[in-house]
Amino acid sequence: MDPYALLELEPGASEVEVKKAWKRLARLHHPDLNPDNPEASAKFHQIRDAYEALRSGETSVGPSQEMDDDWLDTVDWMIEFRRRVVMGELMPRLVGEYGHGTALAWALMQAQDLQAAAEALPERKPSWRLRRLKLDVILAEVPGMPSSAALERDRSGRLQLTLFASGLWLRRGADEDALREMVFATVDHGLSAAVPIALGIHSSPPTLALARQVDQRIARNNLIIRTIWGAGFALMMMMAWIMATS
């Protein structure tokens, strides 16, 4: 088919118009945003091929040979989409079931498939407490980076899962679906690894029952500490009042 027709453009459209049409239609037909539409993937690949054809001036399309901004934008968009799915839909379910402590870390470290583990639980609304995890996912272009991902803590203490563009580029292949699955699996795995670190839990008990016992002990200790602190503060205020009125 005519690549201009696939991108809903008039023949001879400018490079800017082609790029805008590609981004608009890519988001409209992306398979991840159309899980109930079996034709979305084929349509997405058609418009991607049309875009590449117009950029290269060729009728057949293969993987690009340079790491251009358009490709990085596509991967960055996939990363952001998956991060929102994990933190906005999957993590609330797990937090609602396991809490915010050792039991949650246990569940995440045990899960082989984060999405399957979460979808087995009732839906939950995102909690403001998720912000305490301080997780972030970024895309960094680092030439020569052999690995595709790394976990690190930035200057503010926020844990970052960095997906290296050069590592992804080496694994790009010709299959958009395989690239998307690899990005999504890496994000899931990285966030699962980051949560125990963010919570300060470096090892998890072997069973969920023991993990819940640890959480109960921590909660009990925190309650005792708060009670002692509150009583001490009240005593200090009373002594100050007595001294002021004597």
Image (cartoon, rainbow, N blue to C red):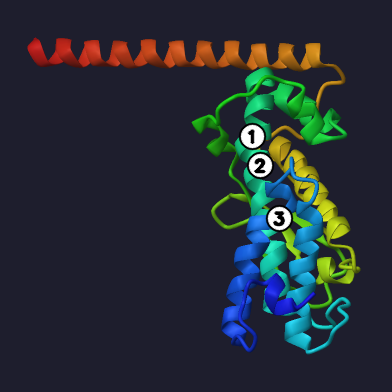
Disc 1 residue type? Glu
- Pointer 2: what residue? 85
Q: Nearer the viewer, residue 226 or 67?
A: 67
Q: Are marks 1 and 3 in contact (CB under 8 Å)?
A: no
* Marking on residue 30: 3
Give the quarter of the figure containing the C terminus. Answer: top left
Residue 45 position in % (x across, y down): 80, 64
Q: Residues within 10 Å of mark 1 (few under 14, many from 20)?
A: some
SS assignment at label 2: helix
Residue 140 position in % (x across, y down): 69, 68
Disc 2 residue type? Val
Residue 184 position in % (x across, y down): 78, 50
Q: Is residue 165 visible?
A: no
Marks 1, 3: nearer the viewer: 3
Marks 3, 2: nearer the viewer: 3
Residue at coordinates 74% horizontally, 40% vertically from top-left?
36
Q: Are marks 1 and 2 in contact (CB under 8 Å)?
A: yes
Q: Nearer the viewer, residue 138 or 232?
A: 138
Residue 117 falls in image quadrant: top right
Q: Nearer the viewer, residue 1 or 232?
A: 1
In the depicted structure, whether residue 191 falls above or below residue 221: below
State the separation of the CA atoms marked 1 and 3: 19 Å
State the separation of the CA atoms marked 3 and 2: 15 Å
- Pointer 1: what residue? 89
